[in-house]
Amino acid sequence: MKPLKILFLIFLLSCGSNELTPKQKKAELFYSQGTTKLIKKDYTAALDYLLKANQLDPNNTKVHNNLGMTFYFKKQYAQAEYHLKKAIELNEQNSDAANNLASIYYNQKKYQAAEKAYNDILRNLVYPHQYRTHYNIALLKLKFKDRGAAYKHLLAAIKIKDDYCPGHVLLGQLERSSKNLNKALKHFNDATQGTCFNIPESHYLKAITLIDMGAFEEAQETLETLKVKFYTSPYSKLAEKRMREIATKSIPTRKSWKNLLPSQKRLLRQLENDSEFGKAYEASKF
């Protein structure tokens, strides 16, 4: 699995145009353009548009949220924190901005501040994205070596949103590391359904769990799907490698990696040995 990343949230929706003054409508246009650039990771253009939006409508909480995230991705952390705090000041119910601020604390290794912020968000009973809060807290609990609490928050996340892909992937990782292969397989299978289908990592994790269980035929089918549907992904080559190993009934070892590309080796290390999750898990076993 790739090193686990904390989740950020970007405001996507605009107000109805009939509710806005002409000045606010112009600000909304800049905001929309800036948000599009932010999603496309064109942070310089995003910053230009969002600063113009903020100049026209300085008390818009969603503009400040997206400005905060743009500054964060441009590594201007003080500015990022300022705008996220401003977004919360303008609307105390802006839990997306609060979540982003907590996530910045997490990435800065200010774990106690992050935990307090996340717990404050959980008190917002009308916030529709609490599943993301629970997922982020789960990552934080792994940092604290509290695997049991992480597990509970992940269960809470998928209870709120049963098709939440990252939650199922991480739960599958926890179960697989504990050798609970049937439970791991269920979560990885859920992580390949619906909107989760387009995540090649989920298919690969499902396949290697099936191999662990000795279900080689089903693993072969999963790997074939991975190879064909995601042929531009590095996972496609990994799937092909696994399929050859299944054909000879051999489980891969480090020695068998010698013909893999460096990028494929990195993926295997991340998935099976050296991921941030793996380290956190090994340090937090019951």
Image (cartoon, rainbow, N blue to C red):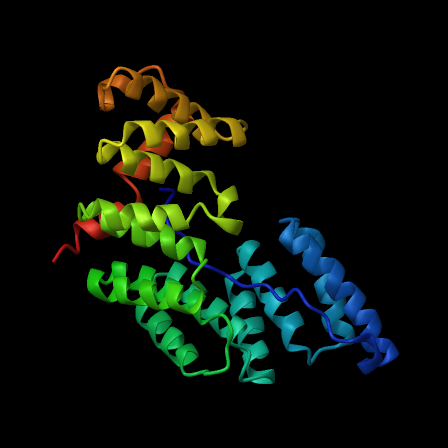
Q: Please determine whether, in this image, residue 75 is positioned above or below residue 84.
A: above
Note whether residue 230 is visible: no
Residue extending furthest toward the left: 286
* Residue 256 left/right relative to 34: left
Residue extending furthest toward the front: 217
* Residue 64 left/right relative to 203: right
Q: Please determine whether, in this image, residue 86 is positioned above or below residue 195.
A: below
Quadrant of image for the C terminus? bottom left
Residue 148's spot in the image, x, y percent? 20, 64
Return the residue nearer the eye: 195 or 76.
Answer: 195
Residue 125's spot in the image, x, y percent? 45, 83
Q: Say which quarter of the image contains residue 265.
A: top left
Quadrant of image for the N terminus? top left
Note whether residue 43 is visible: yes
Q: Residue at x 27, y 39 (%)?
A: 274
Q: Residue at x 40, y 75 (%)?
A: 117
* Residue 139 left/right relative to 197: left
Q: Please determine whether, in this image, residue 185 is positioned above or below residue 223.
A: below
For the image, the number of numbered tags is: 0
Q: Say which quarter of the image contains residue 256.
A: top left
Q: Residue at x 51, y 69 (%)?
A: 81
Q: Please determine whether, in this image, residue 276 is positioned above or below residue 267.
A: below
Residue 46's spot in the image, x, y percent? 69, 56
Residue 261's spot in the image, x, y percent? 40, 20
